[in-house]
Image: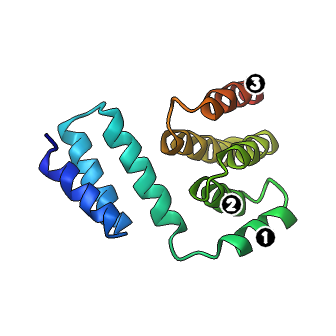
Amino acid sequence: ELSEHHRAALDAMEANDFHRAADEFRAALREEPGNAELAYGLAQAELMSRVTGTDPNAILVRASSLPFTDVETQLAAADVEVAYGRPDAAFTRLIAAVQATAGDERERLRERLLDLFQAVGASDPLVSQARKALASVLF
């Protein structure tokens, strides 16, 4: 049986109210820390809240014309790629950006990559491959 917050999060996702869904998933995770299904839902809600209302084609065109050191653009492009079914492209993009940056920018890229791994799902083979590639870039 789903908790009240979990049910509310799913209802919000169906209504495309991704900010409310994220809030409800966070509340549900406070009640059930470590629940993988809730963590996945939160990652999906946060991803969708970042891409909703954007122009995916414009983001991807802009990202292709800028260096990997343009962190904001690369993050936005990776979000679009995952949201539209191209996690492999997003992972490749962010790993290249991690390699091209340092310090806080690198950490921000790494954290988003981990968030996107969660949004795609830990059992996806692409996530496993990308984790290995990330580790080789970082170490």
**Which dot marks residue 5?**
none
Return the residue at label 2.
77
User: Residue under circle 1?
Assistant: 62
Instruction: Rate crowding at label 2 as few (under 14), some (14 to 19) or many (20 or more) other CA atoms within 10 Å.
Output: many
Q: Is residue 44 above or below residue 139?
A: below
Residue drawn at point x = 28 percent, y = 50 percent: 25
Residue that appears at 72% across and 72% down: 57
Which residue is labeled 3 in the image? 136
Q: Is residue 129 left or right of residue 30?
A: right
Residue 96 x/y as whole percent: 79, 43
Q: Nearer the viewer, mark 3 or mark 2?
A: 2
Label 1 is placed on what type of residue?
A: Arg
Quarter of the image containing the C terminus? top right
**Quadrant where the image shows the N terminus:** top left
Q: Do the residues under discs 3 and 2 have CB atoms within 8 angstroms? A: no
Tell which of 101 and 40 is nearer to you: 40
Horizontal and vertical percent for residue 76? 64, 62
Q: Residue at x 79, y 39 (%)?
A: 99
Side (left or right) of 83 relative to 129: left
Give the CA distance from mark 1 to mark 2: 9 Å
Residue 2: quarter of image = top left
Residue 66 x, y percent position in the rendering: 84, 64
Number of residues whose C-alpha sits closer than 10 Å to that of mark 1, classed few (under 14), some (14–19) or many (20 or more) = some
Q: Is residue 63 left or right of residue 34?
A: right
Q: Secondary structure at mark 1?
A: helix
